[in-house]
Amino acid sequence: MPDTTTSEPTRRDFLYVATGMAGVVGIAGAAWPFIDQMRPDASTRALSTIEIDVSSVEPGMSLTAKWRGRPIFVRNRTPEEVQAAQAVELQELKDPVARNANLVGEQPATDVARSAGEGRENWIVMIGVCTHLGCVPLGEAGDFGGWFCPCHGSHYDTAGRIRKGPAPENLAIPTFEFTSDTIVRIG
């Protein structure tokens, strides 16, 4: 019959565990400054969201703001512009995908999917950078009354969808929400 005796922890066992724990704490303390420096600084966090007062934007007008170093187009479309954008068939679009940060998954690039939503179809918010080579399109211009990029001839409609020219995708839509009737928060 084998002798199965359990040995009591010795002072040496305690020293091994204590030394190991001290090493773990030392490594964590030395690594923390490297981990902590990866966080964005206060100026970057401050630019992550902006609020824009759109109370002075009449139907048919637009304004340009700057968010994260890029222009943002906010447009209050007229009922005629909304109606014309909603009448466009998806087969006519060069890029039929919505690419709206407010939507989950890929959805068709209908006018309602690209606008501010039910009850606010007249409002559209887009990142004002041409998807061809990154130029800034001119507002209320082009063959479709939306935006026109003069660098290479991309034409966008009033919903920011590419209709003609070399741009491969629609103008991107950032994450945004109306916090009141006159304030839109982007980011």
Image: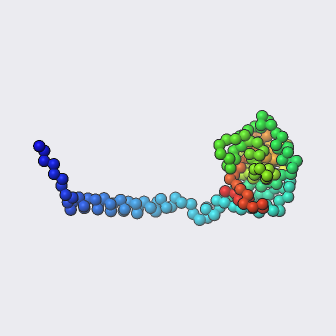
Residue at (83% x, 52% y) in the render: 77
Q: Is residue 38 left or right of residue 155?
A: left
Q: What quarter of the picture does the N terminus occupy?
A: top left
Farthest bottom residue in view: 42
Q: What quarter of the picture does the C terminus occupy?
A: bottom right
Farthest top residue in view: 91
Q: Examine the image and state in which quarter residue 92 appears.
A: top right
Residue 7 drawn at (x, y percent): 18, 55
Does residue 141 appear in this view? no
Colouring chosen for the image of the structure: rainbow
Residue 88 drawn at (x, y percent): 82, 39
The residue nearer to you, when weighing 153 against 131, is: 131
Farthest left residue in view: 1
Residue at (71% x, 56% y) in the render: 177
Relative to 16, is 82 above or below?
above
The residue nearer to you, when weighing 11 against 126, is: 11
